[in-house]
Amino acid sequence: MTPTVVLPVIIGGLYAAGVYLLLDRSLTRVLLGFLLMGNATNLLVLSAGGPAGLAPILGYSEPEEMSDPLPQALILTAIVITFGVSAFVLAMIHRSWRLVHQEVVGTDEEDRRVAARSATDADELDPDELDPADRAAGHADSLHTPEADDLGADDVDLPAVTGAR
């Protein structure tokens, strides 16, 4: 039996497309990339499991003719995990769409500000000597400002809910 090149090429293509889609800011594309990578992994484990054989039941076939049940069990477990993570990402997409009417992850200005700071160990910092722009988001000086009290619990402008539904 000669090995075929088709299956490794398909697996490589699925991995490449999955990684490409995972690097996008759109959550829908991230979900599709995750699904493609999960399917590529399932194919990789299945192909690494060896040739097909008879059912691994004692008395049904000889031990050397049996197929290995471990890759099948791993693939079944991976399918269940992929389904759970996909459901979670779909819930995040739905929540994002309901809150801001888009499912593209925006640039976080706090992350940019933290990345632009100098590389200083946190133990060396004295909170009283920090520049106000370098203070942490949850620093005691920034918690009770009039602007923060007007925002409420969420940082997203949602219409006020009055009365019971």
Image (cartoon, rainbow, N blue to C red):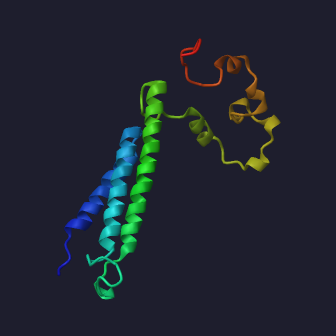
* Residue at horizontal 33 percent and vertical 52 percent from the top: 36
Query: Where is residue 88 drawn, in percent x and y?
Result: 47, 43
Left-right relation of 9 to 87: left
Query: Where is residue 47 drawn, in percent x and y?
Result: 29, 70
In this picture, is 106 found above or below 44? above
In this picture, is 138 found above or below 7? above
Quadrant of the image containing the N terminus: bottom left
Q: Residue furthest top?
A: 162
Q: Residue furthest front?
A: 59
In this picture, is 114 found above or below 46? above
Q: Residue furthest left?
A: 1
* Residue at horizontal 55 percent and vertical 19 percent from the top: 157
* Residue at horizontal 45 percent and vertical 49 percent from the top: 84
* Residue at horizontal 36 percent and vertical 62 percent from the top: 41
Left-right relation of 18 to 77: left
In this picture, is 52 found above or below 81? below
Left-right relation of 77 to 5: right
Asked whether 115 or 102 is in front, the reply is: 102
Left-right relation of 60 to 94: left
Query: Where is residue 132 drawn, in percent x and y?
Result: 73, 30
Query: Where is residue 151 drawn, in percent x and y?
Result: 64, 19
Q: Quadrant of residue 10?
A: bottom left
Q: Count every numbered label the image shows and give the total.
A: 0
